[in-house]
Image (cartoon, rainbow, N blue to C red):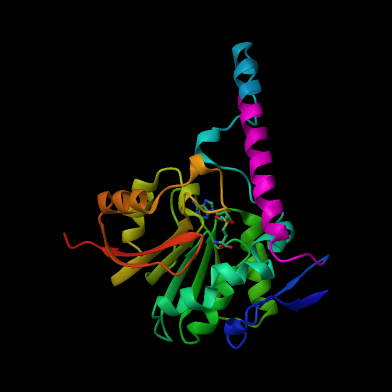
Amino acid sequence: MVRDIVADRADVSTERGIVERPRRSAPGEFLADFFREEEMIRNFVIAAVFVGFNLAGIGIEPAFAQTPSTHQHGFGGAEHWARVFDDPGRDAWQKPHQVIQALILAPNAVVADIGSGTGYFSIRLAHFVPKGRVFGVDIEPDMVKYLADRAKRDGLTNVTAVSGRPDDARLPAKVDVAIMVDVFHHIADRDQYFRKLRESLKPGGRVAIIDYKKDSPMGPPASERITADGVKAELRAAGYALVKEHDFLPNQYFLIFRAAKS
Ligand SMILES: C[S@@+](CC[C@H](N)C(=O)[O-])C[C@H]1O[C@@H](n2cnc3c(N)ncnc32)[C@H](O)[C@@H]1O
């Protein structure tokens, strides 16, 4: 079944993204599933590492050993994640229209949506920059393909799906704004990452970070969340200055930075 993903009336006029949904659910149900699933995956990874150490101890190199502390797990299976990230119930608290308006984008702006997933923000951003371009960057090949297919299906020729690397967004051109929604905590070496990202910003370019507050009822495990103050400190160290902090999102902080003058 194909239907509009917009949920709140404020967003109806500008958001036309569509997504296939194999089944109908109560708003928010998929997100609850997502965080339950994140917890399960985390527990699995911890168990896998534990087993891995023991295998390594007996001289067997386990292919699946990962570190649980980085909260890294795969985002393959984009059709599944689409039901999570594009859950219509998300719009009520994610307020994507208000977020994009707060970025104050020119119609010809070039925007990078880093960690674009299934394109929840990329598709909406594309409508705000009809003469510009949106680079939807993800490290997960299935997500990259999903976004490319979705943009094509929606006739959004100003969206480019980009295959990033964990340590480099690999942006094909400089951007006016790079936005990361619920991605910051997934990046391993953030100092190196954000120093490199500075090179891909146009003069006066900005970086917007949205991620879960410590006390949000949803989000990754509390121990893996990074506070707004933590983000500010990390980005200051990587050569950025905070220019704006929005507080209209109930579950997430929303910070905007510029490269600091050197
Ligand atoms: C929680 S999802 C958020 C998706 C999207 N931003 C949204 O709000 O719907 C995190 C996404 O970031 C991607 N990701 C994780 N680490 C990344 C990195 N270093 N660079 C780019 N994407 C990354 C994952 O593959 C996943 O699609």
Q: In this view, does 254 lie to the left or right of 221?
A: left
- Image coords of residue 170 (percent x, y): 45, 59
Q: Does residue 236 appear in the picture of this structure?
A: yes
90 within the magenta span: no
The structure residue drawn at horizontal position 68% and vertical position 66%, both measured from the top left corner, is 87
Find out whether residue 39 is within the magenta segment. Answer: yes
Q: Is residue 1 left or right of residue 207?
A: right
Residue 170 seen by the camera: no
Residue 141 position by quadrant:
bottom right
Q: Position of residue 146 (x, y in %)?
A: 67, 65
Q: What secondary structure characterizes most of the magenta part? A: helix
Q: Give the range drawn in magenta.
A: 24-49
Q: Is residue 221 above or below residue 142?
A: above
In the figure, is residue 36 to the left or right of 162? right
Does residue 3 sit above or below 190 in this rendering? below
Q: Is residue 107 above or below residue 74?
A: below
Residue 10, given in percent of the width and then of the height, sits at 57, 84
